[in-house]
Image (cartoon, grey):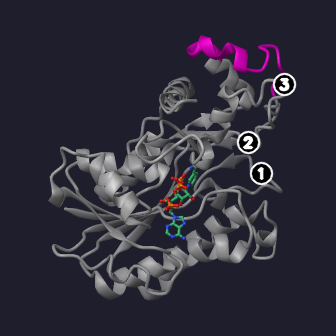
Amino acid sequence: VKVLLTGGSGFIAAHIVDILLQHGFHTVVTVRSDEKGKRIIEAHPNVPKEKLSYVIVKDVAKDGAFDDAVKSNPPFDYVLHTASPFHFNVQDPVKDFLDPAIKGTTGILRAIKEYAPTVKRVVITSSFAAIVNGKQHPKVYSEKEWNPVTWEDAMDHSQVYRGSKTFAEKAAWTFVEKEKPNFDIATINPPLVFGPIVHYLNSLESLNTSNQRLRNLIQGQMKEKIAPTGNFLWVDVRDVALAHVRAIEVPEAGRERFFVVAGFFSNKELADIVRETHPKLESKLPPADSPSDFPENIYEIDNNKSQKILGLKYRPLKQTVSDTIDSLLAVGA
Ligand code: NDP
């Protein structure tokens, strides 16, 4: 059984690759350069050549970007689409975020419809960003909620990432409804993802966005003052990766959206965990009696669907933080 995984050089995708291989799938990743592709192959020296390979897709926003990548012999059974920009270096909201997110998503669906008729399901990495309503939180967050962000809101640099994920996911559901392709889709909607980094792709400087607060914490950047937490929901990267693979393995996952969330956290709680699991880092951490900004009243979360249909069992925060810190220390933090 053969899978195409876009954005193979990404933080989440690197973990998806490992689970796909463990579960016996033939895996082809898309990457933006030969160099990144080679690093992925070299990091898996015991995997036979036909089980893991790469194709270059330089820019997912380009018309026809995926046309060649989806053609394969033997043909693909499933596609996992993770490639999408996630950083805070916004210059042009449309060019940097909205185009690659939206056109990347519709582009791959169109290419599959046209050139890869054997594909049965496409799993798309969406986000809690496509669920959250920052202006008015509901009592309970679940798959039923949608971010009401408008295109105009998304021109604001602080909203553009959330807009990109919301519009991209909407475009995917609309595509399926209108075009009625041979495949169905499922979306995975995680909040902030923490977890071990993959050494062959990451350095401390080019660290994926969602782990940066843990790096900053252990480098002493919150020693004087803990940064505002901002978003209080998290999930482990290994659980997110497994969710993607389960979403192709479980027939009932088709046509479903999955809010893949482990629980709540605050930056103060991260600091307290590091103090306990890595006491040697004490001198870098904020004082133990620093105040927490965790709100007294906060919405609830409902992750039942992901547990029931995908069979996920979420890792606890302490394990995730501890494993992430170990992986950051291993690259010199
Ligand atoms: P990374 O930045 O590590 O991965 C993003 C991937 O997308 C990289 O492989 C990157 O390639 C690729 N990419 C970005 N823009 C383009 C483009 N224009 N053309 C081709 N490839 C592109 O982030 P994550 O692993 O965290 O994110 C993966 C997915 O998960 C994204 O869709 C993100 O929105 C989603 N997500 C992430 C969360 C998190 O907290 N980490 C939370 C919720 C959703 P390159 O390496 O060459 O830049």
x, y percentage for residue 70? 31, 77
Are circles 3 and 2 on residues that touch, CB within 8 Å?
no
Distance in Å between CA atoms under marks 1 and 3 = 31 Å
Distance in Å between CA atoms under marks 2 and 1 = 7 Å
Q: Judging from the image, what secondary structure is the residue with disc 2 in? A: loop
In the image, is 110 to the left or to the right of 157? left
Task: Report the amino acid beneath label 1.
Answer: His
The quadrant of the picture occupied by the N terminus is bottom left
* Residue position for label 3: 224
Q: Can you see residue 16?
A: yes
Q: Earlier in the sequence, mark 1 or mark 3?
A: 1
x, y percentage for residue 101? 58, 71
Q: Residues within 10 Å of mark 1 (few under 14, many from 20)?
A: some
At x 79%, y 24%, the residue is 223
* Residue position for label 2: 299
At x 57%, y 48%, the residue is 206
In the image, is 63 to the left or to the right of 157? left
User: Measured along the vertical axis of the image, is residue 232 above or below residue 54?
Assistant: above
At x 26%, y 46%, the residue is 44
Q: Judging from the image, what secondary structure is the residue with disc 1 in? A: loop
Q: Can you see residue 309?
A: no
Q: Nearer the viewer, residue 141 or 38?
A: 38
x, y percentage for residue 151? 75, 76
* Residue position for label 1: 137
Are circles 2 and 1 on residues that touch, CB within 8 Å?
yes
